[in-house]
Image (cartoon, helix red, strand yellow):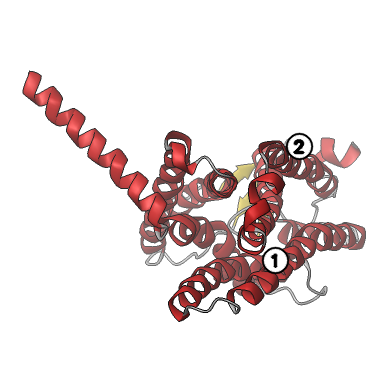
Amino acid sequence: MEYLNQTSSNRFFLVGLSTDPFLQPLYFMIFLMMYMVTLTGNILIIAVVRTEPRLQTPMYFFLSNLSLVDLCFSSTIVPKLLLNTLSEDKSISFWACVAQMYFHLALGGTECIILAIMAYDRYVAICHPLHYYNIMNLKLCFLLAVGTWSSNFLNSIYYAYSTFQLPFCRSKHVNHYFCEMPPLFRLSCKDTLINEIAVYISGGIVGLCSFVLTLLSYVQIISSILKIRSSTGRRKAFSTCVSHLSVVSLYYGAIVFTYLRPRGSYSVHRDRSVAILYTVVTPMFNPIIYSIRNKEVKESVRKIFIYRDSQRTILKFHH
């Protein structure tokens, strides 16, 4: 606790995306619009899945979990990024930095595993359709969701704690737009090899295992799709798989690049660009790729808006 006590009264300073005064308003507008799309899209998905009876299936249950993760994940980082973009004071308190790193790690790991579970769900649905509801039953879905959330939130305590046990005596300027482990490691005057090895181990267990499970599920899915006789059916199924795999590859690629690369390959500008992919871009695109293109979701959304319009018309008529 010695290092923790020494640093708990200090503040860090986030360098941000750019110090150029002409670019900062542009960045603010771009990320504000992206954040608003993220909030709207993910809240809409959660609301639709909860209110529409025909969407009470394992696939949409995990989709709503993914939307909740994206909503929280983006909200952990983007509001502070927006504030710092236009503010002269770019500082963040020690405990706010701890919280930001903790939730970023916990939610990032949760997203990895949920993406893998969603791929497995599609594998069971396509390759074993007759046994789908027996395999993906309510109890299993609940246990998978609870296990995923709780294990990642417990696991992240160690990484946040061990990172902020380090003595930050070189500088308090974090060369990033949020509190991230690699930039913080470089502020310490103590050797961080043990911390980095722990990150490799955790990243290997959570990130790579989830990615391998996703990949294996899709190998089986594509193999089954190739057996479909209808060219239209194959094209439609492949289109869905390509969209899903695009987001998965984007997210996992960014995570692996950030946490599972050799020491000494750190690049400030490159790392910021990669981080934007999984902290801002992916949470925005997930509801679009997984849901907005989905016919059932679009019909459910349309039904909600039609119902609201009809209620407004009735109220106006009565008045």
Q: What residue type is labelled 2?
A: Ser
- On the question of residue 11 being in view, the answer is no
Mark 1 or mark 2: whose residue is earlier in sequence: 2
Q: Where 234 falls versus 40 (above or below)?
A: below
The residue under the point 69% across, 71% down is 220
Query: Does residue 215 sit above or below 153 in this rendering?
Result: below
Residue 217: numbered disc: 1
Query: Residue 312 vs residue 198: left or right?
Result: left
Give coordinates of residue 91: x percent, y percent.
58, 46
- Nearer to us in this view, 222 or 74: 222
The amino acid marked with disc number 1 is Ser
Q: Distance between the residues labelled 1 and 2?
A: 45 Å
Quarter of the figure with residue 193: bottom right
Q: In this view, does 23 lie above or below 179?
A: below
- Disc 2 crowd, CA 10 A, few/some/many (<14, 14-19, 20+): some
| Residue that numbered label 2 is attached to | 8
Q: Residue at x 60, y 64 (%)?
A: 275
* Image quadrant where residue 310 sits: top left
Residue 81 or residue 112, whichever sits in front = 112
Say which element carries label 2.
Answer: loop
The label nearer to you, 1 versus 2, is 1
- The answer to which quarter of the image holds residue 134 is top right
Q: How crowded is mark 1: few (under 14 residues within 10 Å), some or many (20 or more)?
A: many
Observer-nearest residue: 295 or 249?
295
Q: Which residue is located at x 9 percent, y 25 percent?
A: 316
**Element type at mark 1:** helix
